[in-house]
Image: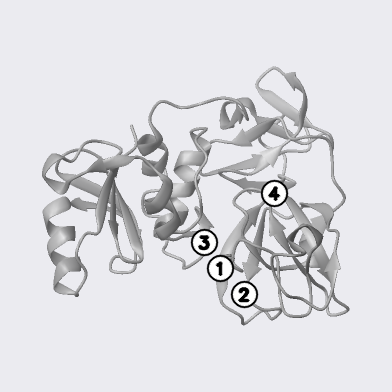
Amino acid sequence: MPALDPRIHPFRPDLAAKHLQGQVEAAHFVEGTELEVIEPIADLRRAPAHEAPLDTQALSGERVTVYELSDEGWAWGQLENDGYVGYLSANALGPLSATPTHRVAVPRTFGFPGPDIKLPPMTALPMGARVTITREVTQFALNGYGWHFPLTHLAPLAATHPDFVAIAERLLHAPYLWGGKSSLGIDCSGLVQLALQTAGTPCPRDAYMQEAVLGTPSSTTDLRRGDLVFWKGHVAIARDAGTLIHANAHHMMVAIEPATEALARIKAAGSDVTSVKRIL
């Protein structure tokens, strides 16, 4: 039996999900409790400590299956969105609300206490956050708290977008953050995942996972808009035959640059392209 990846399967030596019994070794197996992310952004860390490495982030409205709540205020669980496993602040989680109906489709939006953009906003939600809209009033969509979101900033969960690259371009100049997936900070695979999911296409979290399951093989000599270019530990999106957009540590932001320059620079650092995958 192949070994399971603990990054996407909830098991530790002392504790594991009940559905993994017989597949992994653990001292205890438990059923999880489903909770919901109630903060705009919740960090998922590799260990129960604020200084622990950031593996990814969960966004408001996402469901989390929690297998342990510690006395120190940490929840160990698995994200519904991409299956990532790790530790979140228990304060970022709450009981399930009504099933989300919409996602935020712009880099960031505000929820106002009334139908007036001059009112001080009650929350600021990032692209990809999920909200439950109960009704629409003129130019606003209302959730269960009565917060008013600009209607043009939301898209129904079932909606698709024909060009995920255009969504990635909305995040141009967002700062680079390892493990990040919002306009406040994002990494290379987070940009790909967020853009594809906002366009209505499922996408795993890490570059190596994306390389394994997304698209069909292509090459750097035939780049087209929407192609994904992979290196070991990195991924970029082709805007056209000559330019790439990617979150990268060289620019420390989401940047657009000539493909030839990016390919040469990364090759000079010791990494060759491992594959090109055609998405569109």
Q: Residues within 10 Å of mark 2 (few under 14, many from 20)?
A: some
Q: Residues within 10 Å of mark 3 (few under 14, many from 20)?
A: many
* Mark positioned earlier in the residue sequence (4 or 1): 1
Q: CA distance from mark 2 to mark 1?
A: 6 Å
* Mark positioned earlier in the residue sequence (2 or 1): 2
Residue that label 4 marks: 60
Residue that label 3 marks: 180
Q: Position of residue 143 (x, y in %)?
A: 78, 33
User: Relative to residue 173, is residue 130 depicted above or below?
Assistant: above
Residue 84 quadrant: bottom right
Q: Position of residue 241 (x, y in %)?
A: 15, 39
SS at circle 2: loop
Q: CA distance from mark 3 to mark 4?
A: 14 Å
Q: Residues within 10 Å of mark 4 (few under 14, many from 20)?
A: many
* Mark positioned earlier in the residue sequence (3 or 4): 4
Residue that label 2 marks: 46
Q: Position of residue 126 (x, y in %)?
A: 59, 47
Question: Does the residue at mark 2 contact the one at mark 1 (Cβ under 8 Å)?
Answer: yes
User: Relative to residue 82, is residue 77 depicted above or below?
Assistant: below
How many labels were placed on the picture? Answer: 4
